[in-house]
Amino acid sequence: MKIPLVLLLATLTLAGCRAEEEAKALQANVSKEQVWTFIHFNVPEEDEGMESYYYFGQIPKSIYQLISTNSLESGFVHVQNMHYWGNDDLIYSYRDQQNNGDMIFRIEDIQTIKLVRKAPVVGRGYEQFEEPKNQGIRPASGEDKSS
């Protein structure tokens, strides 16, 4: 699976205008260490429109660091184990009988990218990423002031 991906990216890289940036992206995409991210893509449509996509997915840590520091502005990013928001505000896996759960996007199409601390749970909504709220419990002060 890795060799065809590298060949595909290498072929697409040679067709790009920014060969150095494309090579940097290609090298960063083969990193083994992955991080979970939430990425908003704006992808140009054929009719000159724009389509927005919001995905959770794993990308190489090295490419995340390059993108998030604006050190890499073009090339391709391989997003693995993709999840998406459904119309019912629940998270669904992109992997099914037709799709393997991976896609390749242009880095230029990324509008925002955020690091996610844990993998999204399919069937749950945004509440899984919210911090637990203090339920009125106060830390012990060591002294009872009511006496």
Image: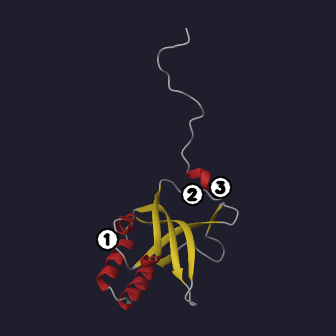
Give the class, few, some or many, for how many residues have Cα within 10 Å of label 2's Cα (few <14, many ≥20).
Answer: many
Question: How far apart are the alpha carbons under marks 3 and 2?
Answer: 8 Å
Discs 3, 2 touching: Cβ within 8 Å = yes
User: Which secondary structure lies at badge 3?
Assistant: loop
Identify the residue under disc 3. 124
Image location of residue 115, percent across then percent down:
45, 59
- Which color scheme does this rendered protein use? secondary structure
For the residue marked with disc 2, what is the amino acid? Pro
Which circle's residue, 2 or 1, is located before the other in the chain? 1
Image location of residue 106, percent across then percent down:
45, 79
User: Which secondary structure lies at badge 1?
Assistant: loop
For the residue marked with disc 3, what is the amino acid? Arg
Identify the residue under disc 1. 71
What's the residue at 40%, 88% (across, down)? Answer: 11
Image location of residue 16, percent across then percent down:
37, 88
Front position among marks 1 and 3: 1
What's the residue at 53%, 57% (across, down)? Answer: 119
What's the residue at 39%, 62% (across, down)? Answer: 33
What's the residue at 61%, 76% (across, down)? Answer: 99
Identify the residue under disc 2. 120
Question: How far apart are the alpha carbons under marks 2 and 1?
Answer: 27 Å
User: Which secondary structure lies at badge 2?
Assistant: loop
